Image (cartoon, coloured by chain):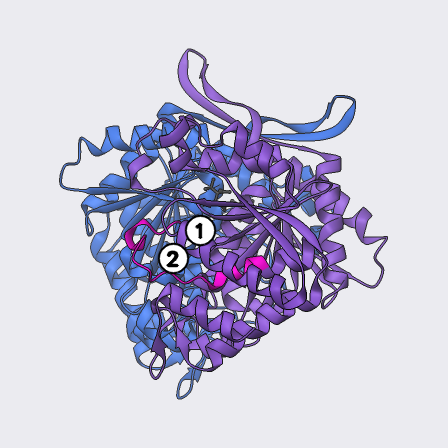
Chain colours: A blue, B purple
Amino acid sequence: MKRKIAVLPGDGIGKEVTRGAVEILQAIAERYNHEFEFQYGSIGGGAIDETGNPLPEETIEMCKASDAVLLGAVGGPKWDNNPSHLRPERGLLAIRKELDLYANLRPISYYSSLSEASPLRKEIIEEVDLIIVRELTGGLYFGKPSERTTHEGKEAVVDTLFYKREEIKRIIELAFKVANGRRKKVTSVDKANVLESSRLWREVAEEVAASYPEVELEHMLVDNAAMQLIRNPRQFDVIVTENMFGDILSDEASVLTGSLGMLPSASLSIGGPSMYEPIHGSAPDIAGMNVANPLATILSAASMLRLSFGLEEEAEEIERAVRDVLDAGFRTRDIVADGTKVLSTTEMVAEVKASI
Amino acid sequence: MKRKIAVLPGDGIGKEVTRGAVEILQAIAERYNHEFEFQYGSIGGGAIDETGNPLPEETIEMCKASDAVLLGAVGGPKWDNNPSHLRPERGLLAIRKELDLYANLRPISYYSSLSEASPLRKEIIEEVDLIIVRELTGGLYFGKPSERTTHEGKEAVVDTLFYKREEIKRIIELAFKVANGRRKKVTSVDKANVLESSRLWREVAEEVAASYPEVELEHMLVDNAAMQLIRNPRQFDVIVTENMFGDILSDEASVLTGSLGMLPSASLSIGGPSMYEPIHGSAPDIAGMNVANPLATILSAASMLRLSFGLEEEAEEIERAVRDVLDAGFRTRDIVADGTKVLSTTEMVAEVKASI
Ligand SMILES: CC(C)[C@H](C(=O)O)[C@@H](O)C(=O)O
Ligand SMILES: CC(C)[C@H](C(=O)O)[C@@H](O)C(=O)O
């Protein structure tokens, strides 16, 4: 198989972790006789410095011409006081919109070898295996107006939570498809007791559910979901929700198992290339020190093989290699525990590669 | 001191827990020579059944003529399928607006005697002592339009996040005042990398901070706050945020210490009566069984004495009594642990009363 992969390292540790993931993808290509062509583009703070634009036109063109995109992370203190159109995360929001990355998938799974790193008690997080399906191109993130205004002569401000019914439908449909291949339960999270958009969301969820009689649909209010994720995360299989609720809940969920540096994500497009990236940020404090955990990005690359290229065996091979390396007691310093050995970023990549 | 207290028991266990709190308030009145006059009104599901209105006009009048309001809880499965204007929680939203209850205060504190009830590890939650100051009458909850619409001929929906600058200012000012009497740190939570309303929020926070040089101001993005509450809740003193973020974060925070049945809240008005209520819901599954935990409502009554009537000593007397009863090993069944004795609702109230 021949594929073009656009790599956007971004800022901070983004460079180190994408370099690691590319090495693993190359090892897979060699082992399974594929041809992956890597092309590099800029996004975020680095792109602002070079071009004055957090998402340069060339990057967009390159991504659109690729089969999938691998992203590191964006942002850093250097750009924190920039005006909002010149901030690194604008590049992220822009690429989601440009590539129509409507669905963000974040699996949260328990690694028994990392249980001590969790802030939660072992009996709460053991066997947690859930996935959050977050709508990524609508809602408060892109609704207009989003501006300063006046109200009865007084200064005021407005943001807009806007959804087309079809945008709601396609994300809920995806959640049902995902659940169908898992434990067959969808928890649709909304705030139907307050928001009209949530009431439409609930209606559409019921409508979609009718086509998936074997999948159970449950509705949960967002405030309750924020509680339930901590009290009893095992109750969840697939959680589907709108953009802002998904942003909050998926970050909350990402710390449950104590393995933030391990968590991959996929942002899917319907026709074009999808994008894969670790959940963690650019961690400017440790950038360039060769200590970042490359596993989330390596696991994101595995998701790319599975979801964009249909290479299930190759994806599983990477996931197995990562598990084996952890079971052998190797760790980066963010997940270190008694009796384990701390590796640098490049050493960790080398261990995973050796295990493939 | 002579005061009129409006009591709105509401639905489910609301009746049992407000009855308990009224008993304690009466004990305090006797002991300290005050005169509290209690008047009862209906709200929520019961009010819908009786009058077809989740917040009858008489209830509003009675509350406005009182010095403070004590609320139990509203809601239940009976009304779950009602159209949205006939749902119990509409009564809650309406009373907030009618009484202009702009600020919801939720203190979350660690009870060492309850540490086993927490889903978090002891070393994470020990000594947690934070308070969430949530804006309660603006944002997505009341912004217009909030309706079905069409976009390029297609079905769509819109909700509106609207704030006047002065609404933002008064809540942030309150947070600084509260912090000034505590550990002098305000964490202002927003989503300034996406929302214009959050950017105004940040500006106003900086402006208010200038008048409180002794209080530290920190800004935190809402997704990060959802993580930090679990990873390291001790870092927080006062968290201030807008209505919807506050709804989500305060429910998340309320399960940290494992003492949901213990948590009081206060909803403050600027000129008129303020309202006090437990954080927990109406718990229809255990309603009428005399097993509900009355302590959150009793502690809410203590907040009323402190914040509405300025009766600090009396408030502390109630809080001390509650602590003593817990230290003596008495529990309701929601917080039971090895070696403690389970009491009914009325027995628990009697113990607290005996300790005053
Ligand atoms: C950086 C920010 C705009 C972004 C978001 O809110 O979507 C981030 O938090 C995420 O979840 O990818
Ligand atoms: C019942 C509901 C409308 C309410 C809210 O969202 O404000 C509740 O969740 C709360 O926090 O008091």
Q: Which mark is residue B254?
A: none
Q: Nearer the viewer, mark 2 or mark 1?
A: 2
From this view, report whether residue B225 is shown above or below residue B43.
below
* Chain letter for mark 2: A
- Does label 2 or label 1 sit earlier along the sequence? 2
Q: Who is closer to the viewer here, B36 or A315?
A: B36
**Disc 2, SS:** helix
Q: Who is closer to the viewer here, A63 or B207?
A: B207
Task: Tell me if A285 is positioned left or right of A244 in this view.
Answer: right
- Give the residue furthest to the bottom: A339
Three-letter amino acid code of the residue under disc 2 = Leu
Q: Give the tally of numbered discs.
A: 2
**Disc 1, SS:** helix
From this view, report whether residue A81 is shown above or below residue B121.
above
Three-letter amino acid code of the residue under disc 1 = Leu
Q: Quadrant of the C terminus of chain A?
A: bottom left
- Residue A82 is covered by the magenta coloring: no
From this view, report whether residue B331 is shown above or below residue B186.
below
Q: Which residues are magenta?
A: B281-301
Q: Who is closer to the viewer here, B212 or A168?
A: B212
Query: Residue at label 1?
Result: A249
Q: Which mark is residue A229?
A: 2
Can residue A256 be seen at all in this image of the molecule?
Answer: yes
Task: Tell me if B69 is positioned left or right of A200 in this view.
Answer: right
Q: Are marks 2 and 1 in contact (CB under 8 Å)?
A: yes
